[in-house]
Amino acid sequence: MNEQPKHEIARDNHYVPQATLRRWSSDGKTLFAYRLLVSHPSVPEWEAKSIRGLASQRDLYTVFSDNVEQDDFERLTVEFEQPAISAIDKVVQGDRLKRDDWHSLARFVALQDLRTPSNFFESMRRWEKTMPELLESTTRQALKEFERSKAKGIPLSRDTESNEFSGLIKSRVEESPEPDSNDLVIRTEITIGRRLWIASMRHALSGVVETLCDHKWSIVESSGDMEWPLTDHPVLRLNYESPGKYDFLGGWGKRRGNIMLPLTPRHLLFVQIGKDSGRKLEMSREQTLLLRRLLVERADRWVFATEPMEWVSELRPRRVDARAFAAENEARDRWHQDQSRAEVSE
């Protein structure tokens, strides 16, 4: 663990880019922030916060691989952010977007949907449920291939091509614990944590992301003088049937699902999958109010705005819990140490 990287590691990882946060700032340095978990009732509901310290976590994307710290994913994010920044500038200026601009925005949606702590914890909960069955089915398939090859006298080929998940799955063969048994037991293990999360994001951004590029995206301006709020998980994947029947579990390619991302306080990137709504889409005041509410409902810990939005506290009353606040901060401070320990032992 003492080996040093060949370049300086980018420690402060913004999971909402500073360039995005500045779109909601009047001075380019601060914006108004509403925190959903606070330590004491005396904490102001809305505070002017420095952009530099918001939507950021130290070493969120830094991983240990071959006993060396690596920040390849942080550097990959720049490749998605820079073209999107240029495209959003065109949106603000009212310029016509070209095909490459729309694709840059779609890829930015993918990155922004995947890269947040909220996505990490949702992925962890999903993997804890599905990974045992997945590993078992993978092992059974491998055994079938082995048995078929053995029966035909054909050496079992080994796929040496590496991918994002190479090295994450560990298998070992053991003797059966049953006495007088000649059977062998294959144990397959994978560490569920940051490294798997990074690998899954890289996999999605290297291929599955093209699904989003195929959609017919629209730019939606907010109605009247209303503004779109920004949150710490700003992408909304919405399955909507009625005011009381909807969820945020939509997929990137699920027909009739809605995907949206605020680009500026006035501009929202939007698509209803399978529908071409035109490059500019108008929404009524009622539709704008609905989407603003849904965006805030999807927030994890923060809501950001150009100025305080009093309705947010009515929709999402903050939780005042000193113990939970301290525990969350402690877990964040231990994040890199805990994740690194697991990665080194893989």
Image (tube, grey):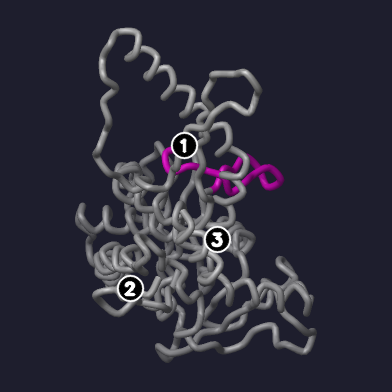
* Residue 235 seen in the current view: yes
Residue holding disc 2: 3
Q: Residue furthest top?
A: 152
Amino acid type for the residue under numbered disc 2: Glu
Q: Is residue 249 magenta?
A: yes
265 left or right of 145 in image? right
Residues packed near mark 2 inside 10 Å, few (<14), some (14 to 19) or many (20 plus): few
Q: Quadrant of residue 83?
A: bottom left
Q: Mark 3 or mark 1, which is nearer the start of the sequence? A: 1
The residue under the point 24% across, 74% down is 6
Amino acid type for the residue under numbered disc 3: Thr
Residues packed near mark 1 inside 10 Å, few (<14), some (14 to 19) or many (20 plus): few
Q: Which numbered marker is on residue 255?
A: none
Q: Mark 2 or mark 3, which is nearer the start of the sequence? A: 2
Q: Are marks 1 and 3 in contact (CB under 8 Å)?
A: no
Estimate the spatial distance between the alpha carbons at disc 1 and disc 2, rounded to whole Å.
28 Å
Q: Mark 2 or mark 1, which is nearer the start of the sequence? A: 2
Residue segment shown in magenta: 238-253
Q: Quadrant of the N terminus?
A: bottom left
Nearest the camera: 247 or 204? 204
Q: Residue furthest front?
A: 180
Q: Is residue 114 magenta?
A: no
Mark nearer the viewer, 1 or 3: 1
The residue under the point 72% across, 87% down is 43
Nearest the camera: 323 or 190? 190
Estimate the spatial distance between the alpha carbons at disc 3 and disc 2, rounded to whole Å.
52 Å
Residue holding disc 3: 288
Q: Tag 3, which secondary structure?
A: helix
